[in-house]
Image (spheres, rainbow, N blue to C red):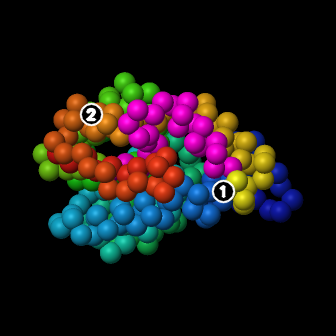
Amino acid sequence: MAMTGTEEPAPTQALFLEEWQVYRKMVDNDYLFHRDAYDCLHRYLRDEVTGPFRFLEAACGDAGMSSQALLGTKVSSYHGIDISKQALEIAERNLARLPCPVVLEEGDFVSGLRNWRHPADVVWIGLSLHHLLAPAKAETLRDIRRIVGANGRLLIYEDASPDGESREEWLARWDAQEPDWPAYSHREWTMVNDHVHSSDFPETDSTWHALGKSAGFAHVKTLFVSPTDLLRLYLFQA
């Protein structure tokens, strides 16, 4: 049933809408350098993946930026997984621009990847693996290595530390960003910061490389480092 201006959204929808507005403000103001990261993803898919490819996005959210990144590439199919039904409804509209079949699946991306039984040529995860501790990251990377087969690849954009930096030191550098996020109210910054402090677990650059190698990827390459050096985009290749 469509909502009118006089109806109150359901509690879960209201929470989603509030969190979504805060998230969209982060993206629209490019505070986490999404534009550079997705430009990098687009260039890689356009220039380095020469044949048709099956694209699997874990924790796809609204797929707004990934759908844009896929335009002008040889993507032959898109499959997205996300736990939010509301986000998937938005993703369906965003992905309508792609010239290929699209399938969206509601569910947790970790279990979704663990139970995945279809081949994919490229797997993409943007800012979601960092919610897992290192052993769970390793297990998920092994699941993806199985999915992409002999010639596939994984690209991720995630929290990352320079070698030798602790999580506490990374969080201190994260905290120092507040003056650089002027579009956020103090309440909005606090909402984001509370989430980061409770749920973000960056790995050092060497650890990300080691996790990829231990999962069975032959090559791990850093394609992009954010200007803050809080985030990095990695390519894992079979």
Q: In this orientation, which residue lies closer to the viewer: 70 or 157?
A: 157
Q: Is residue 151 visible?
A: yes
Label 1 CA crowd tier, 10 Å (few <14, some 14–19, many 20+)? few
Which label was assigned to residue 5? none
Q: Is residue 53 above or below residue 117?
A: below
What residue sits right under mark 2 in the picture? Answer: 210
Amino acid type at mark 1: Asp
Q: In this orientation, which residue lies closer to the viewer: 166 or 86?
A: 166
Amino acid type at mark 2: Ala
Label 2 CA crowd tier, 10 Å (few <14, some 14–19, many 20+)? some
Q: For residue 216, what is the image quadrant?
A: top left
Residue at point 71% right, 47% down?
189
Name the side, left or right, on which 88 lies relative to 14: left
Q: Quadrant of the N terminus?
A: bottom right
What residue sits right under mark 1 in the picture? Answer: 180
Q: Quadrant of the C terminus?
A: top left
Q: Is residue 232 above or below residue 37?
A: above
Q: Is residue 129 visible?
A: no
Asked if the stretch drawn in magenta spans residue 166, the answer is: yes
The span picked out in magenta is 155-178
Asked if the stretch drawn in magenta spans residue 222, the answer is: no
**Numbered disc 1: secondary structure:** helix
Q: Could you tell me residue 220's position as x and y percent? A: 24, 45
Question: Gap between marks 2 and 1, in whole Å?
Answer: 32 Å
Name the side, left or right, on which 97 lies relative to 212: right
Mark 2 vs mark 1: in front = 1
